[in-house]
Image (tube, helix red, strand yellow):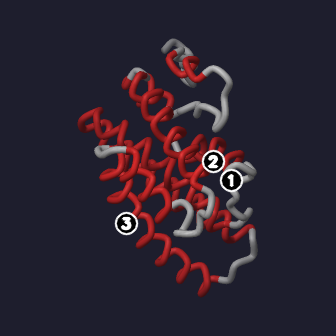
Amino acid sequence: HAAVVSDGSDCLCLSPECSLPDTLNSWFLIAQLHVWMCLVRMRQEGREGKFMCHYIVHSMWEDVDQRSKIMGIDAVQRKEAMKAMTETFYGAIFGYDEGILSDDCVLAAALWRNLFSRQCEDPRQLELMVEYVRKQMQFIDALDGEDLLLTGEVKWRPLLEENAQSILKVVSPTYNDTGL
């Protein structure tokens, strides 16, 4: 769910470990990474997962539009930015898919191109983000698909955590509808 994606990605965007500026574009680059992780997981859920993928992407674009309006970006600039972001999004999805199916070097290259916009000078930041993506994917792969489809919530793991083994502890979901 895009609202949950933005919750996790806002704190990551401001994280000094990432060294990304606090801009709409940085938020978008981080949001698209989290959206992609959700899409990978939802693709495993058949027809309902495919529907959820469309919903997640639609919600992300709605969120981008709302944030750009709040920031006072005029309609012409907003349209141009959305076009550029759309191209970026589909390129990033392809790169991240290739990265997750390959080794850490390929994933690091995808993160360098798409998240850091080819401007990461510190290899430790790339290494941290590769670990972050791998740990998030391991975590959301362990979540129950029906629960994900019902709640639409992913509680992202922190960027830095002392006990990474805690990712194996799955939090029980809370449902919005009475009786479920």
Q: Which of 4 and 130 is in front in this view?
A: 130
- Where is residue 60 shown, x and y percent of the image? 52, 56
Image vertical order of residue 171 relative to residue 111, above or below: above
Q: Which residue is drawn at 66% across and 66% down?
A: 24
Q: Earlier in the sequence, mark 3 or mark 1?
A: 1
For the residue marked with disc 2, what is the amino acid?
Ser
For the residue marked with disc 3, what is the amino acid?
Gly
Q: Which residue is drawn at 52% across and 17% down?
A: 170
Regarding mark 3 in the picture, which secondary structure is present there? Answer: helix
> How far is the residue under mark 2 from the one under mark 3?
20 Å
> How far is the residue under mark 3 from the one under mark 1?
21 Å
- Where is residue 72 shown, x and y percent of the image? 75, 76
From the image, tell me which residue sits under label 2: 9
In contact (CB < 8 Å): disc 2 and disc 1: yes
- Where is residue 20 shown, x and y percent of the image? 68, 61
Q: Which residue is drawn at 50% across and 29% down?
A: 151
> How far is the residue under mark 2 from the one under mark 1?
6 Å
Residue furthest to the left in view is: 46
The disc at residue 91 is 3
- Where is residue 75 shown, x and y percent of the image? 62, 83
Q: Which residue is drawn at 54% across and 14% down?
A: 169
From the image, tell me which residue sits under label 1: 13
Regarding mark 1 in the picture, which secondary structure is present there? Answer: helix
